[in-house]
């Protein structure tokens, strides 16, 4: 079994609601996010788990839906990377059956990985 990944980038703002008043994430702030999409399987006749070019719908969705947006206006849930990771996985799993995990980094030192 092999795993491949593709990385996508976007910038956006958000505000986590309900946190203590002195928590920095309770204020509106932004991140330069990195999303990594992981697919697992055996190579096809061309030697690919999945042709990276076939992942363009994910890139298009990120560009149109998330990039330079306020994530609280996009989602109807707490905009933590934990919740966003699961949402993106659920959104694309049917279209990409080999999808194994979604990882989102908010900063170079923090990330969340949702996998099943």
Image: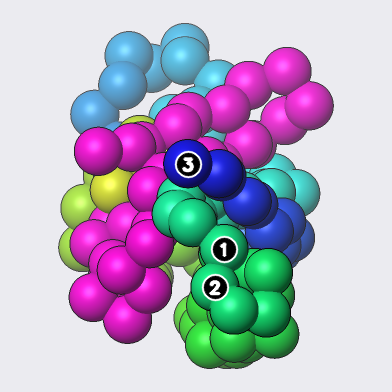
User: Residue 62, image x and y in percent?
Assistant: 57, 75
Q: Is residue 80 magenta?
A: no
Q: Is residue 91 magenta?
A: yes
Quadrant location, the C terminus: top left
- 92 above or below 37? below
Q: Quadrant of residue 9?
A: bottom right
Question: Which secondary structure lies at badge 2?
Answer: loop
- 55 above or below 21? below
Q: Residue at x 59, y 86 (%)?
A: 54
User: Residue 60, image x and y in percent?
Assistant: 60, 87
Asked if the residue under mark 2 is in contact with the one under mark 1, i.e. CB atoms within 8 Å, the reply is yes
Q: Is residue 36 left or right of residue 94?
A: right
Pointer 2 residue: 44
Pointer 3 residue: 1
Kindly report the distance in space between the C-alpha atoms of the residues bearing marks 1 and 2: 4 Å
Give the magenta-colored segment's residue range: 87-116
Characterize the local packing of mark 3: few (<14), some (14-19) or many (20 or more) Cα atoms within 10 angstroms: few
Q: Residue at x 46, y 50 (%)?
A: 40
Q: Quadrant of residue 49?
A: bottom right
Characterize the local packing of mark 2: few (<14), some (14-19) or many (20 or more) Cα atoms within 10 angstroms: few
């Amino acid at each position: 079994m092999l795993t491949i990944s593709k990385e996508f980038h976007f910038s956006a703002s958000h505000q986590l609601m309900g946190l203590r008043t002195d928590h920095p994430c309770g204020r509106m702030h932004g991140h330069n996010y990195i999303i990594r999409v992981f697919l697992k399987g055996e190579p096809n006749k061309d030697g690919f788990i999945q042709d990276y070019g076939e992942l363009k719908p994910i890139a298009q969705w990120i560009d149109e839906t998330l990039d330079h947006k306020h994530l609280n206006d996009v989602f109807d849930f707490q905009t933590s990377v934990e919740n966003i990771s699961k949402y993106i996985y659920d959104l694309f799993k049917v279209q990409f059956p080999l999808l194994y995990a979604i990882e989102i980094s908010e900063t170079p030192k923090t990330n969340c990985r949702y996998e099943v």
